[in-house]
Image (cartoon, grey):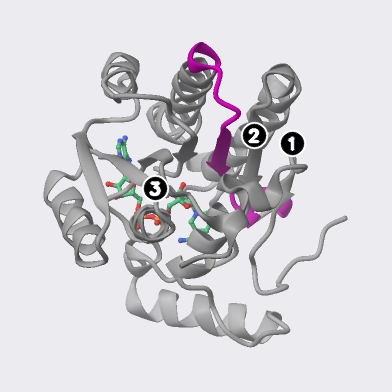
Amino acid sequence: MPLTAYDLSGRTAFVTGAAGGIGRATSVLLAEAGATVHCADRDEPGLRETAALVAERGGTARLHPLDVTDRTALAAAVGSIAGPLHVMAAIAGIMHTSTVLETRDEDLDRVLAVNFKGVLYACQEGARSMIASGTRGSVVTMASGAMDSASAGLLCYSVAKAAVVQLTKTLATEVGRHGIRVNAIAPGWIRTPMTDRHEPATQEQAEAAMVRHSPLRRVGVPEDIAHAVLHLASDASSFTTGQILRPNGGVAMPW
Ligand code: NAI
């Protein structure tokens, strides 16, 4: 049984990217904290695996196979929830690497569509639903440590994540009067299917570099970020809004 402030019993959460590493771990943890979890992702078999993990822990998951770039599908999924929505966790995202000189219009359009517009739609639908039901809910977005520094090849990705932070802060200023909080998480390197897709040598090198640069001497795991989402989703953070939480093992320490 979680501490009272972290208890989500009787609450409803919507998680995008729920078939993957961080979104899956978040769905499982929010369910363990007592929430009914609505899991959205374009990967339907992956969603079913997440639902099985939630059920193993005695939780309840409802599945919404959809693409977050489809505003209508997202609105329909959020609209189908019976009762009020308390938590919107906009986690779905894709990685893309290309140098500035090699970046094509279609690369930028795709990354912005998923990593920015997909988050915007989830934020809009989540906040609208909370306002309509008078729920003092929490919206959590997924940025990235990539926005804090310049990394070769990460232009599209880091621009989209910086935009997510601006969206998060702007929405926080606009919906605070309804008691709705909006915060971003900017993780460091987390071992997930996204980072596992790197070539093994590159992945090994990247992880070794992260371990070298982290005061904690390890890379992150999805559960590290799921706990950050739980904190921001729950009453434990009831005076926190418009903020960026950086679970990154101390690799970067911006002001
Ligand atoms: P992942 O690739 O393991 O999971 C992402 C999930 O999003 C997948 O289940 C995928 O099917 C889903 N997804 C992607 N595009 C979608 C779309 N258009 N519609 C619906 N679902 C879609 O990635 P991971 O690592 O779990 O990342 C989750 C979030 O955390 C992403 O926003 C990522 O940018 C962010 N992040 C990840 C870090 C890492 O080191 N893994 C570090 C910083 C941020």
**For the residue labelled by badge 2, is the local secondary structure a helix, a strand or a loop?**
strand
**Mark 3 or 1, which is nearer the eye?**
3
Residue 56 picture location, percent across and down: 20, 66
Q: Is residue 49 left or right of residue 178?
A: left
Residue name at image x 23 percent, y 31 percent? 66
Q: Is residue 133 magenta?
A: yes
The number of callouts visible is 3
Report how far apart the C-alphas of labels 3 and 2 lie in the structure.
18 Å
- Alpha-carbon neighbours of circle 3 within 10 Å: few (<14), some, or many (≥20)? many
Residue 242 marker: 1
Q: Is disc 3 in contact with disc 1, using a CB cutoff of under 8 Å?
A: no
Which quadrant of the figure contains the C terminus? bottom right
Amino acid at dot 2: Val
Amino acid at dot 3: Ala
Q: Is residue 217 magenta?
A: no
- Report which residue position mark 2 lands on: 182
Whether the residue carrying mark 3 lies under 8 Å from ligand 1 is answered with no
Q: Is disc 1 in contact with disc 2, using a CB cutoff of under 8 Å?
A: yes
Stretch of the chain drawn in magenta: 131-149
**For the residue labelled by badge 1, is the local secondary structure a helix, a strand or a loop?**
loop
- Judge whether residue 193 can be spotted in this image: yes
**Sequence-earlier tag: 3 or 1:** 3
Amino acid at dot 1: Gly
Residue 111 picture location, percent across and down: 44, 35
Residue name at image x 27 percent, y 17 percent? 76
Residue 167 marker: none
Q: Which image quadrant is residue 216 in?
A: bottom right
**For the residue labelled by badge 3, is the local secondary structure a helix, a strand or a loop?**
loop
Residue name at image x 80 percent, y 65 percent? 253
Q: Is residue 41 left or right of residue 201?
A: left
- Report which residue position mark 3 lands on: 35
